[in-house]
Amino acid sequence: MAEVLVYVDHVDGAVRKPTLELLTLARRIGEPVALALGAGAAGTAAVLAEHGAVKVLTDDASEYADYLVVPKVDALQAAYNAVSPAAVLVPSSAEGKEIAARLAVRIGSGVITDATDLQAGEQGPVATQSAFAASFTTTSRVAKGTPVITVKPNSAPVEPAPAAGTVEALTVSFSEQARGTKVVSRTPRESTGRPDLTEAAIVVSGGRGVNGAENFAVIEALADSLGAAVGASRAAVDAGWYPHSNQVGQTGKSVSPQLYIANGISGAIQHRAGMQTSKTIVAVNKDAEAPIFDLVDYGVVGDLFDVVPQLTEEINTRKG
């Protein structure tokens, strides 16, 4: 069976969920070979093996932390040359998409970004994507070279499938460009205790109808009762009510959770582009004609300041 190269997203050896989802998808089209880079890379092997990696390539060089993007592309190209895979899968983060694009240029292959599903096909892997601000769903495959595909978080279940997980050190020769952009400082992001927005299984968002930064406490309370991430529409972010890092939409982050709850959000195309692939969508809006209701699985016509606190109370009561 052909091997599929999977780029590992981890933090000091702690493998992030999107990588485990990639291993599930990789097993549909071949045998997963994982590539882990940087500090703690060797520590990822046990988890990767538990989820189907037959081999784990590692390199802990300091360049991956000290310089931006290019060293990781060099390493992925070295792994590609060593493995000759049937496909290369990368998590669909901002960095992941840049890595994938650079690799595709180097190896002369086509690239597919933001896939939401992946299946084996007679002429290579077939990816499902949302197109034109999520108005259409398309299926496509790479016509030239080895497919390089980035996959959105929450696109596949995490399914344990124990494999050998043999660890091998990867020899990487860094290019001249690898040290072109150096990281000179880092500022830790303040932790909210909530899951990462793009990886969360549940997202609770607020929009213009929240009507003020102080009122986002209502949205946060519902999110915390569900163990969810908090999102915001562009209108709420532009008004300064919530940080830009939490914006969901075409110019913000794209999310695909199991459950998306939109509160006081009209449903403009800009916002829909960032959340339309959510598995189940619920909206609370006092305007019965709001465009968001054309999209939802469940809609509540009502004032969010009446509906959301009651929902939060009911959830907490059932949990208690």
Image (cartoon, grey):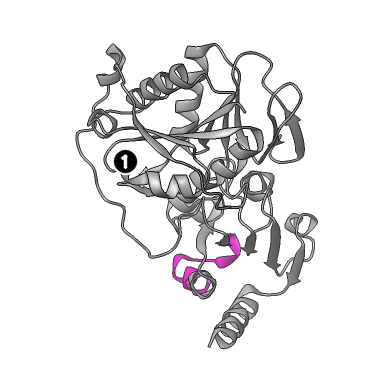
Q: Residue at x 45, y 45 (%)?
A: 48
Q: Residue at x 67, y 21 (%)?
A: 142
Image location of residue 1, percent across then percent down: 62, 28
Q: Which residues are magenta?
A: 205-218
Is 206 within the magenta? yes
Q: Secondary structure at mark 1?
A: helix
**Magenta stretch secondary structure, dominant:** helix
> Which amino acid type corresponds to the residue marked 1 in the rendered image?
Ala
Q: Residue at x 50, y 69 (%)?
A: 227
In terms of image quadrants, where is residue 183?
Answer: top left
Q: How many marks?
A: 1
Query: Does residue 293 appear in this view?
Result: yes
Between 100 and 276, the one nearer to me in the picture: 100
Q: Residue at x 66, y 38 (%)?
A: 28
Q: Is residue 100 above or below residue 239?
A: above
Between 6 and 226, the one nearer to me in the picture: 6
Image location of residue 7, percent across then percent down: 46, 34
Between 42 and 68, the one nearer to me in the picture: 42
Image location of residue 239, percent across then percent down: 48, 55
In terms of image quadrants, where is residue 295?
Answer: bottom right
> Farthest front residue?
164
Image location of residue 136, percent across then percent down: 77, 38
Is 212 within the magenta? yes
The residue labelled by disc 1 is 42
Q: Is residue 303 above or below residue 147?
A: below
Query: Does residue 206 appear in this view?
Result: no
Mark 1 packing: few (<14 Cα in 10 Å), some, or many (20+)? many
> Farthest left residue?
184
